[in-house]
Image (cartoon, rainbow, N blue to C red):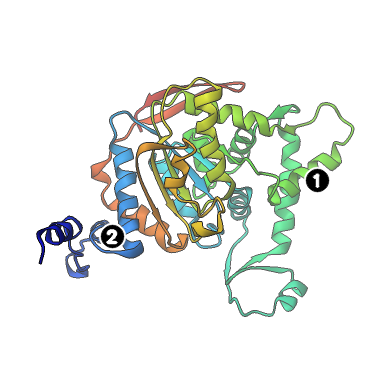
């Protein structure tokens, strides 16, 4: 064999795949750690764990933003998401309205029921049951939740406000310790939903609007203020990390925020320094949800030197594995200081505090 070929082969053949050995996996943390030496999406998921742990252990204390989209509550991930907030492994939550609505739906007694994707949907409609793939929800309870949101909004200050302020208000109205919104409110974690009206929360707000038409003194959702508040957080963060479960508006909005902070608000820094994503979408359709984290580097949204990983795994499988591994290996990143967000209008001061 010519030397040039032998040398070229050695450059490629540096590490062999190590078979997963479940008999030596002492917990989910060990199992996901083993994934790093395998292939296909297992390797990518193992690298996601590495990225998240690196962000948690970084002495520069990155601000970690969690982006949520997809049927996560229907998939049974409500407490997994709540625990991320409770443990302090995320600092800011950005979500579709649908995820947060279904969190509220459960807080007022709604449930998700095991069903089948082959159900007779016409019959379900007759019975006022809605289907989310293989899961049923109660349309009557949805209507009750919509009307509850409309009614409780009457108690919110009659002025323009961001989704962060409104969602914090909703979170304080429920003592539900399994609730994402309630836990975030108790822990002082900002929750944004830049497309809040594209959900059943928007239906509740429409009911509120209907009841208050013609009044100058009414609550108005100020979406542009959302942008400004996010940029305030990013501008005060020496380094940022992003975790995307799914894609959609939360991913695009957080990524756009770092661009706004850098060129429109004078933030001196890079794109997001750590980035990981779990998604079932793929990049070759050109959509945002499946676009690679590498592609985001061309926009300056992800740092040129970022530690990053993208796993094409369905969230109901991938997220519990990742979060279970984090909890299993918590001694690696605990204790972690929390961020305290002190808001005065749309201005924020951020301080570190112990958990």
Which of the 4 image quadrants contains residue 3?
bottom left
Residue at image location 58% in from the left, 77% down from the top:
116
- Left or right, residue 173 beside residue 299: right
Q: Which residue is mark 2?
A: 28
In this rendering, is residue 163 above or below 38? above
Label 1 secondary element: helix
Which of the 4 image quadrants contains residue 163?
top right
Residue 221, how many percent across, how many down?
71, 34
Q: Nearer the viewer, residue 260 or 179?
A: 260
In this rendering, is residue 271 above or below 322? above
Residue 57 seen from this side: yes
Q: Nearer the viewer, residue 100 or 274?
A: 274
Residue 83, how many percent across, how many down?
42, 48
Residue 232 seen from this side: no
- Left or right, residue 113 beside residue 331: right
Rendered image: mark on residue 207: 1
Q: Nearer the viewer, residue 35 or 114?
A: 35
């Amino acid at each position: 064999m010519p030397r040039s070929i032998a040398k070229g082969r050695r450059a490629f053949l540096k590490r062999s795949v190590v078979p997963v050995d479940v008999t030596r996996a002492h917990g989910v943390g060990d199992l996901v750690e083993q994934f790093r030496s395998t292939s296909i999406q297992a390797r990518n998921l193992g690298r996601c764990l590495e990225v998240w742990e690196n962000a948690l252990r970084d002495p520069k204390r990155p601000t970690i933003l969690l982006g949520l989209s997809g049927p996560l509550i229907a998939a049974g991930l409500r407490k997994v998401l709540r625990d991320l907030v409770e443990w302090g492994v995320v600092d800011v939550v950005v979500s579709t309205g649908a995820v947060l609505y279904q969190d509220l739906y459960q807080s007022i007694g709604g449930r998700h029921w095991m069903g089948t994707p082959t159900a007779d949907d016409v019959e379900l409609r007759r019975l006022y049951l809605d289907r989310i793939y293989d899961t049923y929800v109660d349309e009557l309870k949805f209507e009750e939740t919509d009307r509850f949101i409309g009614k409780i909004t009457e108690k919110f200050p009659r002025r323009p406000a961001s989704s962060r302020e409104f969602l914090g208000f909703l979170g304080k109205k429920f003592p539900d310790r399994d609730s994402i919104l309630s836990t975030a409110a108790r822990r002082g974690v900002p929750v944004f939903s830049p497309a809040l009206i594209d959900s059943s929360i928007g239906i509740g707000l429409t009911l509120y609007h209907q009841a208050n038409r013609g009044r100058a003194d009414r609550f108005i959702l100020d979406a542009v203020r959302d942008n400004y508040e996010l940029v305030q957080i990013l501008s005060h963060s020496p380094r940022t990390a992003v975790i995307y479960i799914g894609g959609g508006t939360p991913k695009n909005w957080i990524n756009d925020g770092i661009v706004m902070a850098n060129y429109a608000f004078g933030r001196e820094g890079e794109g997001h320094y750590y980035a990981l994503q779990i998604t079932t979408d793929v990049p070759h359709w050109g959509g945002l949800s499946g676009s690679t984290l590498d592609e985001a580097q061309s926009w300056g949204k992800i740092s040129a030197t970022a530690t990053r990983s993208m796993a094409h795994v369905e969230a109901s499988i991938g997220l519990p594995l990742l979060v279970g591994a984090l909890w299993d290996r918590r001694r690696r990143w605990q204790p972690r200081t929390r961020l305290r967000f002190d808001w005065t209008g749309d201005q924020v001061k951020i301080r570190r505090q112990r958990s």
